[in-house]
Amino acid sequence: MAYFRVSTDRQGRSGLGLDAKREKVRAFLGEGYPPVAEFTELESGKKADRPELRRAIAEARRRDLPLVVAKIDRLARDVRLFLDVLDQGVDLRFAELPELPTGAAGRFMLQQFAAVAELERGLISERTNAALSAARARGRASVAIAAASKKPAQPWPPRPARSALTPMPRTWLRLCGRPWSPRKPQGGCSLAGGPGVHYPPPPPPPPGGEAGHGRPRPSNES
């Protein structure tokens, strides 16, 4: 009889964890492999509610056969649960401990190994919780740093309203002959009218023609 346990659904679906445990049991049983029956369970090692384990123990007692488990921590990671299984009178064998003695000495050694398995479970839990706390702390620190380093958005300066006397650029260029700029003096050129207003003369017409025409007019002289 053989009992296998995996802790996560991923291990159960992939079969990788089960394959490694079956190889241990195969090497332990040798020519006695495969076992009469196999019982596989997907459950945490600290939980006592194990339907497949109960079935395996009952079947091993009914057939008067040893129950083989790959490793001690695959049976349980809780000392009380482990001792409860031992007290049910089933002949337990562990593939990782082929030289384990029988009797009181063997039971004592199994108790020590079960205590080590429980200690390992506690250390794993502590390391996991510490890593999660550190990750949460790093996340909060990263958010705080990012918030502190983010500069507030600078609003765009308001667009100045166009004055009634502010000329349109094209109008100023046409009348004054140069681009208009609010940062440069306009040299007497103004659109407001009145004394002292000076408009530059219009550009001279092209040679041989009148202003506004690009071709010379034909002469009527013969």
Image (tube, rainbow, N blue to C red):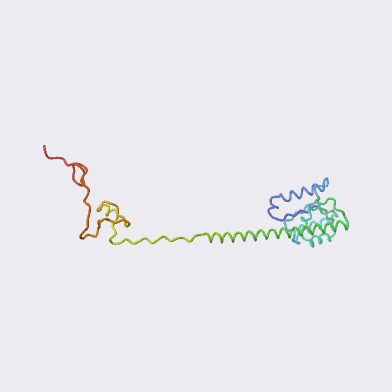
Residue in the foreground of this view, choosing between 148 and 32: 148
Q: Is residue 109 left or right of residue 44?
A: right
- Please identify the residue farthest to the right as the structure is shown: 103
Residue that appears at 45% across and 60% down: 154
Residue in the foreground of this view, choosing between 179 and 183: 183
Residue in the foreground of this view, choosing between 70 and 52: 70
Q: Is residue 169 left or right of residue 129?
A: left
The quarter holding residue 129 reads bottom right
Residue that appears at 67% across and 60% down: 130
Q: Is residue 45 left or right of residue 60?
A: left
Residue that appears at 69% across and 50% down: 14
Figure label count: 0
Residue that appears at 88% across and 57% down: 103
x, y percentage for residue 67?
A: 82, 54
Q: Is residue 177 left or right of residue 125?
A: left
- Is 66 placed above or below 164 here? above
- Please identify the residue farthest to the left as the structure is shown: 222
x, y percentage for residue 194?
A: 21, 60
Quadrant occupied by the C terminus: top left
The quarter holding residue 217 reads top left
x, y percentage for residue 179?
A: 29, 52
